[in-house]
Image (tube, rainbow, N blue to C red):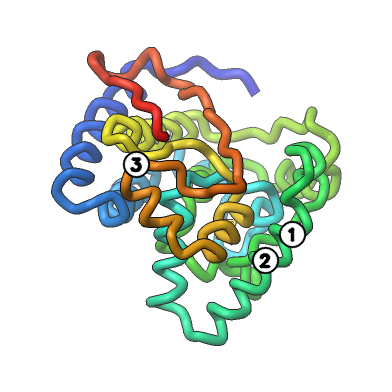
Amino acid sequence: MEFTLDLALIRDVLKRETGQSRRDIEELGLLEALGRAGRRHDAALAEAADAATLACAVGCSWCCHFTVDVRAVEAFRILEFVKTRLSQEQAQAIYDQVRCNSAAIKRLSDDERAARNEKCPFLVQGFCAIYEARPQSCRNYHATDATGCQRSYQEPENLDIDPDFAPATYQIGGAHVEAFSGAMNEAGFDDRVYELNCALEAALSDPQAQERFLNGLTPFIDLVGDDVPMEFADLRPSGDGVNKVG
Ligand code: SF4
């Protein structure tokens, strides 16, 4: 689907969110700052001009079988949520599913992973068990016709399926992700992208991973993250630096 970028809209979100995220990271710490950014992200999408056109609804979960990308900070916040907000039985079932999924897909290419339709470990009876702490990419779903999502599920090897989506929602959501990642990068934290199950398994199996991450080091020893170029990089507020973690 083709559309024209709304540069003013993207610049406005990037400027506001980058500044707020910088302040929150400094004052509240990274995990709490992410929680606040997530609440602003949800509120902004609820007010998007095309929010009413979205097909995404409670109980629709085709996309919960697609590959989910996360930053390390999201994996740590999700695990904190699971530990503090879910029962021990729920948490254990999720840990078991994470390990099972990770073992199945860790060595696969992106396309091979996509073809497996691996169910997200947090999808329980059709609902997201960690909705409040769900990844940024899950907040950003913007389909206007669920049949496109269903087709992608039924034909995971067909990369030509291009479901219709809500452009304003897509741009606002993307700008929120980039603003927080950019602020995190400036503060010296790893902002590389990892597959959800593999990042969670790496965090669960190494008690030092979070400490390494919070000290500005690479969090996962055996997991290579992707340096994903920012889609709206040239629209970011000027003077933004790009740091590299060790
Ligand atoms: S984290 Fe929640 S919303 Fe995201 S894929 Fe998993 S179940 Fe779906």
Which residue position is annotated with label 1? 103
Cα–Cα gap, marks 3 and 2: 26 Å
Cα–Cα gap, marks 3 and 1: 27 Å
- What residue sits 73% from the left and 41% below the top? 148
Q: Quadrant of ligand 1?
A: bottom right
Point out the image quarter for the C terminus. top left
Position of 143 compared to 26: left or right?
A: right
Q: Is residue 78 visible?
A: yes
Q: Is residue 49 visible?
A: no
CB under 8 Å between callouts 2 and 1? yes
Mark nearer the N terminus (3 vs 1): 1
Q: Which amino acid lies under the numbered mark 2 shown in the image of this protein? A: Arg
Point out the image quarter for the N terminus. top right
Mark linked to residue 216? 3
Where residue 33 sits in the image (x, y, percent)? 26, 50
- What residue sits 34% from the left and 30% below the top? 182
Q: Quadrant of residue 126?
A: bottom right
Mark nearer the N terminus (3 vs 2): 2
Which residue position is annotated with label 2? 99
Mark linked to residue 43? none
- What residue sits 38% from the left and 13% below the top? 234
